[in-house]
Image (tube, grey):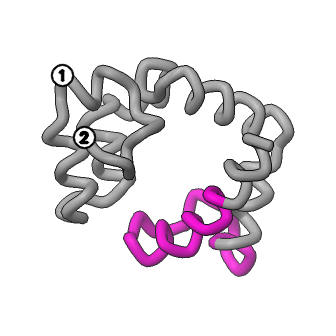
Amino acid sequence: MGSPFWLGGDIHINEIPEGLVSLQKRSTTPGQFFLSYCDGKFTDEDLNEEGNAFTVDYYQEGAFFEDYEEALAADLLAIYYVADTWENFDQLKPIFDQTFREWKQ
């Protein structure tokens, strides 16, 4: 599928690649993808082995929610009010990328 999806699970790469294409083209938002192609559930089949290992560590430390809240929800009542937009994704992506690079070391 290409480098943007190298942590994606086989189900998305081989069985329903149109979802990844819609993300790549930004014709669907990340939240819409999650609801449409993951049935609103984030499971281990959505990522490959490396993606799952990183996600478990990032969530268990609590750092994911700290990063998310600090970047997008500091002025909101709760993280649930963060809009599902590409602008918000673009704010989070550098944080996630840096955290992933540090985790790999």
Q: Is residue 69 above or below residue 87?
A: above
Highlighted range, magenta: 72-97
Residue depicted at 26% across the width and 34% down the height: 37
Residue 99: horizontal and vertical position, in percent?
Answer: 73, 54
Q: In the rendering, which numbered label is found on residue 15?
A: 1
Q: Residue at x 56, y 74 (%)?
A: 91
Amino acid, disc 2: Met
The correct choice, above or below, for 8 with respect to 4 in the image is above
Q: Is residue 84 left or right of residue 73?
A: left
Within 10 Å of the Cα at label 2, are there few (<14), some (14-19), or many (20+) other Cα atoms? few
The residue lying at 80 percent from left, 32 percent from top is 60
Q: Nearest the camera: 34 or 56?
A: 56
Residue 85 in the image: above or below residue 36:
below
| Image x and y of residue 28, in percent | 23, 58
Name which residue lies at 21% across and 24% down.
Answer: 14
Badge 1: residue crowd in 10 Å (few <14, some 14–19, many ≥20)? few
Task: State which tag comes first along the sequence, 1 or 2.
Answer: 2
Quadrant position of the N terminus in the picture: top left
Residue placed furthest toward the right? 61
**Is there a contact, CB below 8 Å, between mark 1 and mark 2?**
no
- Identify the secondary structure beneath mark 2: loop
Answer above or below: position of 59 versus 71: above
Callout 1 amino acid: Glu
Residue that numbered label 2 is attached to: 1
Q: Secondary structure at mark 1?
A: helix
Q: Is residue 2 left or right of residue 85?
A: left
